[in-house]
Image (cartoon, rainbow, N blue to C red):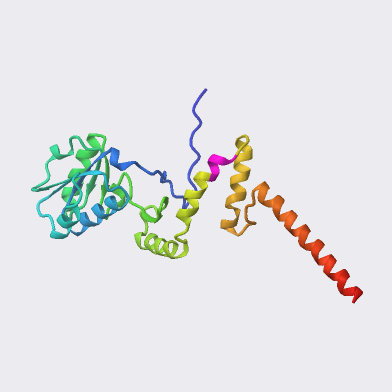
Amino acid sequence: MPTPSPTPSPAGFNPLFPVFLKLEQFRVLLVGGGNVGLEKLTAILRSSPATAVTVVATWISPELRALAAPYPRIQLHERPFAETDLENHDFVFAATDDPALHRRIKAAATARGLLTNVADTPAECDFYLSSVVQKGDLKIAISTNGKSPTVAKRLRAMLEETLPEELDTVLQQMTVIRGQIQGDFAAKVKSLNAVTAELTGGPAYESPATRRWRYVATGSLLALGAVVAAAWRKR
């Protein structure tokens, strides 16, 4: 049976495939020790601090050295880039101010089948770094398809301010709730939907036991109210 052809992307469609990597299981080469290299290393360590990173640069800034110091899996090499540096690495970041060097790195990395991020050159990138919002285990990555990092940063700031810190507590509790829910897959999905409905303005979740006792309590209050009303009328 022939493989169906992919549907053409509509105008304005972002074709990037979103994925969250366990980056600590890979090896990263970062070429550049200035401000751009510092920015890339900061992004890597913020999300995946256990990642093995090799930094190669003719000059490594004191700020980058200070950032790398607490991380034993980061190696710093203050010398010119050599194509042999690409060996035994899985991802490459070209983060210098030398476009010619970037083209050389990109060509050599592509020949070896390595994925490359080239600073300030979206057309040369195999992948982009996202603006990331994190609330504990909740992580949201924002992409503008390389069009506007500024817009992505503004959206990140808005979400960081809007999303409550308690969301992480909700996630931890959901893990416990999911383990306690009985029934088949459809029933579990229905129950989890009920639990999370309040997060989006829906009705709050009640377990069957809680609902039953709420009915009992409501009935008792109504009965008591009727007794009080009858006694008041006899006065």
Quadrant location, the C terminus = bottom right
| x 42%, y 62%: residue | 160
Asked if residue 105 lies left or right of residue 20, the reply is left
Q: How many marks?
A: 0
Residue at the bottom extreme, as displayed: 235
* Residue 153, quarter of the rendered image: bottom left
| x 69%, y 51%: residue | 211
Position above or below: 122 against 229:
above
* Residue 216, quarter of the rendered image: bottom right
Instruction: Return the x and y of residue 69 as percentages of the image width and height.
Output: 16, 52
Camera-side residue of 226 and 231 = 231
Instruction: Return the x and y of residue 162 as percentages of the image width and height.
Output: 47, 64
Instruction: Return the x and y of residue 127 as percentages of the image width and height.
Output: 33, 46
Q: Which residues are magenta?
A: 177-181
The answer to if 64 sits in the magenta stretch is no
Residue at the left extreme, as displayed: 79
Position above or below: 62 against 208:
below
Instruction: Return the x and y of residue 225 as percentages of the image width and height.
Output: 81, 66
Residue at the right extreme, as displayed: 234
Asked if residue 128 lies left or right of residue 223, the reply is left
The answer to if 180 sits in the magenta stretch is yes
Camera-side residue of 213 and 23 = 213
Camera-side residue of 99 and 53 = 53
Asked if residue 2 lies left or right of residue 186, the reply is left
- Magenta span: helix, strand or loop, mainly? helix
| x 22%, y 37%: residue | 89
Camera-side residue of 96 and 155 = 155
